[in-house]
Amino acid sequence: MKFFVDTAIIEDIKELNDYGLLDGVTTNPSLIAKSGRDFKEVVAEICGLVDGPVSAEVASMTYDGMIAEGEHLAAIADNVVVKLPLTLDGLKACRYFNAKGIKTNVTLCFSANQALLAAKAGATYISPFVGRLDDLNIDGMELIADIRAIYDNYGFTTEILAASIRSANHVKESAIAGADVATIPPSVIKGLANHVLTDKGLDQFAKDWAATGQSIL
Ligand code: E4P
């Protein structure tokens, strides 16, 4: 499973990229607002840092507006993925960009039927929002599994990008359910390396090693 980081904070992207943990980046208007930076400037900077796909979301709600904004965003760098909302206008824009060979990420997906429409529109990625469904006591992971089954039934190549990931458990469950990618907040990605028994084991090894009085170098 590929890991995208869900942030517009450059320091976090650099740190995770240096660990070799990043396959791509996703942003959304809320994350851009949180960064306090100019949207196009920050997207250009991220694209220069990361080799993989970088999702940049349109703000317009209309087909014409999405086309104009998406063209503009796609011109920033070759690895920009135009992020479009799962609406009828968004799906129409998805079909347009797909025909032009521009990658798309159809976002705010909350049902298997929405995911089916996105695949039929030629989306590169579909983003089902796991955490926001869980917030409503609806099993977000069941949606990932349903989309996996539907896409496999018909051989759709649209990649399932598990989004709105809030915990390490979400990452594990998405991988088990067959998501192609998970977009994950920086703190959750780093937390995946933690285990209390790893820390305990290291403490013991450090004490035992010190007692030998030896040095490796
Ligand atoms: C995905 O592309 C979205 O940016 C993101 O995962 C939304 O997460 P949230 O529900 O935690 O805001």
Image (cartoon, rainbow, N blue to C red):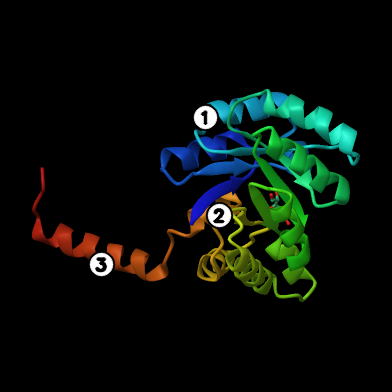
Does residue 38 appear anywhere in the picture?
Answer: no
Q: How many marks?
A: 3
Q: Nearer the viewer, mark 3 or mark 2?
A: 2
* Cβ at disc 2 under 8 Å from ligand 1: no
Above or below 144: residue 30 = above
53 on left or right of 102: left
Local packing at callout 3 (Cα closer than 10 Å; few below 14, some 14-19, many 20+) is few
Q: Quadrant of residue 33?
A: top right
Secondary structure beneath dot 1 equals helix
**Residue identified by numbered label 3:** 204
C-alpha separation, residue under disc 1 versus residue under disc 2:
20 Å
**Residue identified by numbered label 1:** 49
Q: Residue at x 66, y 34 (%)?
A: 102
Secondary structure beneath dot 2 equals strand
Which amino acid type corresponds to the residue marked 2 in the rendered image? Answer: Val
- First reached walking from the N terminus: tag 3 or tag 1: 1
Estimate the x, y position of residue 216 in percent, counting from the top left.
11, 48
- First reached walking from the N terminus: tag 3 or tag 2: 2
Above or below 154: residue 44 = above
C-alpha separation, residue under disc 3 versus residue under disc 1:
39 Å
10 on left or right of 108: left
Q: Are marks 3 and 2 in contact (CB under 8 Å)?
A: no
105 on left or right of 21: right
Does residue 142 appear anywhere in the picture?
Answer: yes
Q: Are marks 3 and 1 in contact (CB under 8 Å)?
A: no
Local packing at callout 2 (Cα closer than 10 Å; few below 14, some 14-19, many 20+) is many
Which amino acid type corresponds to the residue marked 1 in the rendered image? Answer: Leu
**Residue identified by numbered label 2:** 181
